[in-house]
């Protein structure tokens, strides 16, 4: 099986390492340096700075599966626009996965939110994501191929988690009463994508999240207890020093329902809550990263 990836980043690399029998993996990165690093791992990495459109189009044409991880811009999805013709011609593509965000649902006042809830994006970034979802689903309708959208909760995993933040002195316990977020371990994302690859469904939309929406400060408290260190002090949301993007993140409150990935794809999460995920990361020595 041959895979092509737009955006060979953190999540894509977890999918590549998930044990599927890839005979060829190719994809794009932004910089030439990143491309060189990935080539040492046997990936045909093409820098958008250096590779020609013809080289990238040839790799798209070889692929059986396409994973889209690169974010859209204000002008839409630049890679879909740039490579639309080779994508339309790529008759061997049996599966396309587009990685989006649960942010497209907007603020739900803490309500449970499954895939039947209409998208209501409220931030500029979430609006761009939803527009990109629609564009990729439109390509599926145009070509008659299976395009699936995966709406991801907050991603964590090796080097990107509350333990690592504690070790680096960056963890904060910001408290906003009633606020909850879902999360998803990167290895569970990879397993969900693999399950979809085995069961393609055109125009499928899936929430990709853990089972337990939780207050963010609870995750930091649990990580600190695991590591045997004092948790950082609680900071009221109103007093927190947050970027505009982070403040906007806290403006949306919802509980993500993930039943569809279980019913339709047969997924059993390895890390159903942040506790199992952090336990495994701590056992792997994550707190010593800094």
Image (tube, rainbow, N blue to C red):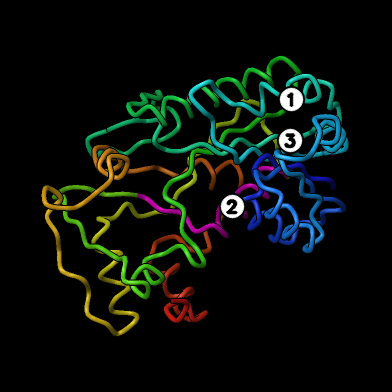
Q: Secondary structure at mark 2?
A: helix
x%, y% of residue 98? 60, 35
Q: CA distance from mark 3 to mark 2?
A: 17 Å
Image height of 108 relative to 135, above or below: below
Q: Secondary structure at mark 1?
A: loop
Q: For mark 2, what is the residue?
A: 11
Q: In the image, what residue occupies the spot 25% across and 55% down?
A: 215
x%, y% of residue 227? 34, 81
User: Could you say which disc has been placed on residue 83 in the image?
Assistant: 1
Q: In the image, what residue occupies the spot 11% across and 52% down?
A: 239
Q: In the image, what residue occupies the spot 45% across and 32% down?
A: 115
What kind of secondary structure does the magenta stretch mostly adopt? helix
Q: For mark 3, what is the residue?
A: 95
Instruction: State the image quarter where residue 202 is shown.
Output: top right
Q: Is residue 46 left or right of residue 112?
A: right
Instruction: State the image quarter where residue 221 is shown.
Output: bottom left
User: Badge 3: few (under 14), some or many (20 or more) residues near its Cα, within 10 Å?
Assistant: many
Residue 185 sits inside the magenta stretch:
yes
User: Badge 1: few (under 14), some or many (20 or more) residues near its Cα, within 10 Å?
Assistant: some
On-image quarter of the C terminus: bottom left
Magenta stretch in the rendered image = 182-197
List the single residue furthest toward the top: 142
């Amino acid at each position: 099986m041959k895979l092509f990836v737009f955006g060979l980043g953190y999540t894509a690399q977890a999918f590549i390492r998930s044990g599927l029998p890839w005979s060829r993996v190719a994809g794009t990165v932004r910089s030439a340096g990143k491309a060189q690093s990935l080539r040492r791992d046997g990936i045909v990495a093409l820098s958008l700075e250096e590779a020609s459109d013809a080289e990238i189009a040839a790799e798209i044409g070889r692929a059986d599966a396409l994973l889209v991880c690169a974010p859209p811009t204000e002008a839409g999805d630049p890679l879909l626009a740039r490579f639309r013709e080779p994508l339309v011609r790529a008759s061997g593509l049996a599966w396309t996965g587009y990685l989006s965000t649960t942010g497209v649902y907007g603020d739900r006042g803490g309500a449970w939110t499954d895939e039947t809830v209409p998208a209501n994006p409220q931030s500029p970034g979430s609006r761009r994501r939803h527009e990109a979802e629609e564009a990729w689903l439109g390509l599926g309708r145009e070509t008659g191929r299976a395009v699936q959208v995966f709406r991801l909760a907050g991603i964590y995993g090796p080097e990107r988690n509350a333990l690592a933040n504690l070790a680096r002195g960056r963890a904060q316990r910001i408290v906003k009463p009633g606020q909850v977020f879902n999360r998803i371990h990167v290895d569970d994302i990879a397993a969900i994508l693999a399950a979809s690859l085995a069961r393609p469904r055109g125009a499928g939309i899936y929430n990709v999240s853990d089972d337990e929406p939780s207050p963010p400060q609870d995750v930091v408290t649990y990580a600190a207890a695991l590591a045997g260190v004092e948790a950082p002090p609680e900071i009221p949301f109103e007093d927190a020093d947050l970027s505009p993007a982070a403040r906007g993140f806290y403006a949306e409150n919802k509980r993500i329902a993930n039943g569809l990935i279980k019913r339709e794809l047969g997924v059993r999460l390895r890390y159903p809550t942040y506790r199992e995920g952090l336990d495994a990361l701590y056992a792997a020595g994550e707190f010593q990263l800094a």
